[in-house]
Amino acid sequence: MGVSHISNRSEKSSERWSRRGVLTVLGVVPAAVLTGCSGSAGAAESASSGGASATASVKAAKTPTVTISPADGTKKADFSAPVTVTVADGTFATVKVTGNDGSTLAGTFNSAKTKWTSTKNPYSGTKYTVAAQAQGAAAKTASFTTKSPGETFVGYFTPEANSTSGVGMPVSINFTHAVKDRAAVQKAITVTAEPAVEVVGHWFSDTRLDFRPETYWAAGTKITLSLRLKDVEGQDGIYGIQSKDVTFHIGRAQISTVDLSSKEMVVKRDGKTLATYPVSGGNAQHTTWSGIMVISERFKQTRMESSTVGLGDEYDISDVPHAQRLTTSGTFVHGNYWASTSVFGHENTSHGCVGLHDAKGANNSSVAGYKFYDSSMLGDVVIVKNSGDKTVAADNGLNGWNLSWADWKAGSAV
């Protein structure tokens, strides 16, 4: 190998070389070869180093690639899955998702900041704009629109927003479609009170959910109902559409106790006796429900017809004064102008209602029917005892107070 480095000379010239000279040259060749090997190694190292630098430069030169799901331009995106944004060859600086209603969709990054996932799913029927920026790169924007649900449901609530009610008023919600996933729906509804008290929901059926505390609300309580039902799937393919907060207020505490043995009603307000009225309850054939009942409707005058409560044509009175509903099945506490005044306080003669002496036309302020009506409000409590009948069903009107706290809580889905 060393000889190949010797210059090509003529044969004659080579003959003039001395043996010593040849040896000298040959002696130098290994050094040259070693030097050459050393130089080659350095070159290789340099090439290797240069290659690594080049590779690093190529990597450093890659542009971060951002992927948004749902993809840009999607018209009917699924609203039952979160929004995700990922980046390759980089990390995120910021991600923001804004709805066309001005709302923002919150989310979190993974530990490497290469993926962002929305904390909640997007709302249905909403256009969203996504602005995602990777470190050292320009922001990428995309927009998509979620599809609208095929079928929807709402919950109609009692009492009315901004109303003031008595201490017995529960928050009662009736749904327009039967609810199969009770837990999902109940989790989307909260009822809070000021002053604070534990409030628990109870399902009476797949269309009715009531909320109440263990005992009556405190006078002056502020109640807030928060509905977050939008896009909650009540049953397969049927979604809620409400997202709102409403408030109610509790007024003074009025509780009236009707004793149909003594045929007397004692009205107490804030713990003090306000009035005592003689009454007449249901007769032996049509006894009045016993138990705790809540005034759910009020009419200065109304028509009462026996056929509507399964009693044929026994009565039809077009102008019953000062009627206040206690049950869905037709129990009222109301004024009575057609019975003798001697009945009240002495006989139970009605078809199940609680009657007070009143005057035709509902304008005589001196009679008991007028006075009691005038002192009452929706949500006031009327307790009936010694009626000869069983306790009213908790779902017959707004009468969940007849359930023990343990039984009430057992009806919760969460």
Image (cartoon, helix red, strand yellow):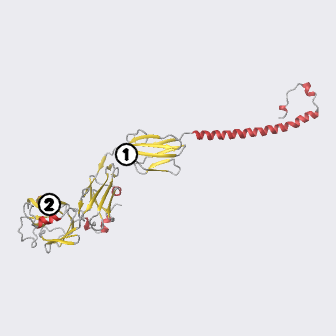
**Above-or-below relation of 184 to 148:** below
Determine which quarter of the picture holds residue 69: top left
Q: What amino acid is labelled 2 in the image?
A: Val
**Above-or-below relation of 151 to 4:** below
Determine which quarter of the picture holds residue 349: bottom left
Q: What amino acid is labelled 1 in the image?
A: Gly
Q: Residue 81, how many percent across, how many down?
A: 41, 48
SS state under label 2: helix
Q: Answer with left or right where residue 82 lies relative to residue 385.
A: right
Q: Answer with left or right where residue 81 lies relative to residue 344.
A: right
Q: Residue 387, how many percent across, how many down?
A: 16, 71
Disc with the residue nearer the chain's start (2 vs 1): 1
Q: Looking at the rendering, in which quadrant would you find the C terminus?
A: bottom left
User: Which residue position is annotated with label 2?
Assistant: 309
**Above-or-below relation of 311 to 85:** below
- The residue drawn where x is 26% and y is 57% is 162
Q: Residue 201, how many percent across, how many down?
A: 31, 61
Q: Nearer the viewer, residue 342 or 309?
A: 342
Q: Residue 149, how many percent across, how many down?
A: 33, 46
Residue 311 seen anywhere in this rendered image of the structure: no
Q: Nearer the viewer, residue 270 or 147?
A: 270
Q: Looking at the rendering, in which quadrant would you find the N terminus?
A: top right
SS state under label 1: loop
**Above-or-below relation of 210 to 92:** below
Residue 322 seen anywhere in this rendered image of the structure: yes
What label sits on residue 102 in the rendered view? 1
- The residue drawn where x is 81% and y is 38% is 35
